[in-house]
Amino acid sequence: MTKPKKKSEMLYFALRNNKLRVGLTIILFFLVLTFVGPMLTHYDPYDYVNPNGAQPPSSEYWFGTTMFGQDVFTQFVHGLKASFLVGIVGGGLGTLLGMLVGFIAGYRGGMVDEVLNTLTNIVLVIPTLAVLLIIVAYLEVRGVFIESVFIGCTAWPWAARAIRAQTFSLRSRDFVDLARLSGMKPWKILFTEIAPNMMSYLLLVFILQFGGAILIAATLDFIGLGPTNAVSLGLMMNNAVLWGALLLGVWWWFVPPGVAITAIVGALYVTNVGLDEVFNPKLREM
Amino acid sequence: MLLAGRCLKKMLKLENVSKVYKVGTFGGKELHAVSNVSFDIEDGEVVSLIGESGSGKSTIGKMILRLISISSGAISFNGIDISNLKGGALKEYYRSVQGVFQDPFSSYNPIFKADRVFRIIREEFFPEITASEWNDKVERSLRAVGLNPGDVLDKFPHQLSGGQLQRFLIARALLLDIQFLVADEIISMLDASTRIDVLNLLADLKSRGLSILFITHDLSLGYYISERALMLYRGCVVEMGATEKLYDNPLHPYTRMLMASVPRLDKKWEEVELELKAEQAEVTSGCVYFERCSEAEKSESCEGHRPPLIEAESDHFVACSCYAEGG
Amino acid sequence: MSLQVENLTVYYQTLRGDVRALESATFTVADGEIMGLAGESGCGKTTLGHSLIRLTPPMRFVEGSVTLDNEELPVWDMGRMNDFRFKKISIIPQYAMNAMNPTRKIGKMTSELLESRKVSFKTTLPELKRRLDLVKLSHDVLNMYPIELSGGMKQRMVMVLSALLDPSLLIADEITSALDVSSQKAVAEMLVEFRDREFVKSVIVITHDISILYQIADSIMIMYAGQLAEKAFTEVIIHAPRHPYTKLLISSLPKVGVKYSEKRLTGIPGNPPLLLDPPIGCRFRDRCPLAFDKCVEVPPFIEIEKDHFVACWKVFEENAQA
């Protein structure tokens, strides 16, 4: 029985998968907001615009203002930008490092595998918080970019493990043997035979890294280890709690960023599950 | 390298080849997948390597193809030791020696079209060839294996049948003008009616000068196609020689057991009492078949002594202490 | 008559339509008969075997009737079939030996299996032990985990379990494929023992390996592309087949004693049809050297001589002339 060509079959299922549709819509919504948002507001995030201090959402200040009279909506859309940046740079770096280590360990095996495994385990076990505290103490100014790089450099181990396992199993397949019999060099085999076979898997890894990076950044910002002079969703929540917004009922300060983080990361995970169903026919609801 | 004074060249020669794997925690124990195997294959000859699972036959095939490293011993091709070739020299070796494996669907990268395997050969071995020359070459190869180019080019693997895929792989090997082919159980996953076609193809290629190592567990296939055969049990060669002599007069207890137990279409099973035992432990010294050998055919000396291959009659060798003693 | 199957038709539901995997199968298996069911991949033998006992989606029952020991088997109703499964009809599925729960000792697995069928493990234990002796498995096996047994031992264990409640019909689906040669012989001969000792009344042995069937089967039924082609006693199928497909198939099998240089065997050119939209009439006609215009009608599966059934217009024609 012939199957329809793989690409169009996947597209067919992709377009019909509810989880994928919902997840992608939510992410797209926030992404658009990131670009469009700053155009909708003419304030700066840290401008003291409202002399009356904390005020609930109104027609002038859509998300209300903070204790210091800053426009929450402006902070929000700029914070979104920072979060997406962290996701792409941090998540992307983590995926790339994971791929590098995972591919090499999985393909070479033997001693190389042992060494890389040990490296992976060490990085996994390092208390990143402690390291970050030390780094923070030495760097006077910290930007979103540095934070992303740090996240990327510490989040790759689990990706490396997963990719190594997949590479291991693909390497023993006959078509890899056939490529070796054709005199192909190992790097070429990795990138032209093995990696393309894992495309769906690598995509899923990236999505999870993306979501994970946003969460980690939010946590770091929340406890004050984030960028010093930028605005991010986590930082907003940090400030809100710091200045007693919880006690004083200034909910419009911390609810939007909290909801946004939850929604974006949640949507990413749901998209992940949806993609899994698309790529793996056995999981589809028939 | 010419071997002066001989009419038949020994193309492929294995001398005391062994493969040992380190297993167990911290690599403490050793698994002897192949132990001291020696044989040779001449120009234009088909040799069958017959054994069940765990006999080491695929391991030998992969060592010849240099997909697995050789633990000890030497394999030479046309006089050159290929055991440690690397890089450019290894690639040159692959111009003369290729392999086809058991599972036709696993041999192709499922996300690409099947003729990508041809493209890879072109990129690696014929980078300068023109498009029209290449197309001619491809067409000739496909016709040589009995495939119609229009039916099989530009298709995904799942759109072709197992038989077509295996022939495609043989065509790929022919693009290189190889001298020697390792065929590792290449028809065991095919349907009965297509098996014989691929088998006939191998025989045709042999008559045109190709040497083939035919690895199989099926005795009747070995008989159909090869002049010489080797019986492998747990990594050791227990009997070898001309196919007819092996089949008409099996000398080793394992060969005899195999002949008696294989279901055949020309005669019914004999009343042979077979004792079935559980998985055996690794045997490092002594006869490798000792545990399963029937009482009537073995003696105490077999347990401690690993017999070498001795010539029982012209072109018929057996490795059995009892045979050597009894005569 | 032990098993009577009439017009059994089963399709597979897929997104692209129904795959007509089994078309109007009509045959009988007598009491005490070991019938081999052979054919190449995609011929429908596994579909037939499974539809007799476990017709689950994506399989879809279209029509037909199955009668075992004069009692109708409601094969289309999974729930009602529960009363028959394991007790009157049983199956040794393909890969069964690998499907044993690795975390359960074999004895525990057996008792759970029996209890789920409301059969007491205690009362069955003596018989179980007798059967283990018969298949040359020590009673210690009940205290072992599946991983401690070899392939042949696991297969024999599964055989004992499947036949434990003395079913009338036992279906064995490719039980020898994954075993080495000596285990194959033992397992195949055990199947005959079960029948000889009347643990089971009849057996259907599904396999692609016709040489095994030659050794143990009383009769062989050959299938092609979802249709029944021929059924006869083993000797007749092997030495005097009538259906063109059977003839070509048997003659394409290498035998010990036949060399390429002496006698070149030939296969069957072409490929089996796709069953999503199969050709009308006899599905072998595109590859059949004897096809003629009548073949666009489906040939019925009828008895041309005692206990010899064929579905081929050419054969009917030859018989009519003879």
Image (spheres, coloured by chain):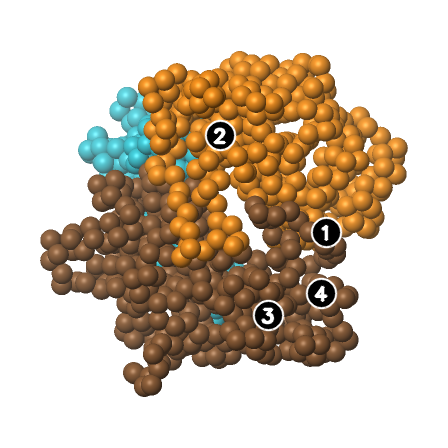
Chain colours: A cyan, B brown, C orange
Give the secondary structure at mark 1: loop
Numbered disc in front, either 1 or 4? 1
Q: Secondary structure at mark 4?
A: loop
Q: Quadrant of residue B90?
A: bottom left
- Label total for image: 4
Determine whether B125 is above or below C148 in the image: below
Q: Secondary structure at mark 3?
A: strand
Q: Is residue A168 above or below residue C63?
A: below
C-alpha span from label 3 to label 4: 12 Å
Kind of residue indicated by mark 3: Val
Q: What residue does disc 3 label?
A: B238
Q: Which mark's residue is nearer the viewer, 2 or 1?
A: 2
What residue is disc 4 on? B293
Q: Which label was assigned to residue B224?
A: none
Numbered tag placed on residue B271 in the rendering: 1
**Residue that protrudes farthest toward the front in the picture:** C322
Of helix, strand and loop, which one carries label 2? loop
- Evaluate whether label 1 is on the same chain as label 3: yes
N-terminal of the pair, mark 3 or mark 4, is: 3
> Which residue is painted at 35% across and 39% down in the image?
C269
Q: Label 3: chain?
A: B
**Residue C175, position as x, y percentages in the image:** 62, 41
Q: Amino acid at mark 4?
A: Cys
Cα–Cα span, label 1 and label 3: 24 Å
Rounded to the nearest angstrom, the CA distance separating label 3 from label 2 is: 43 Å
Q: Is residue B276 left or right of residue B2?
A: right
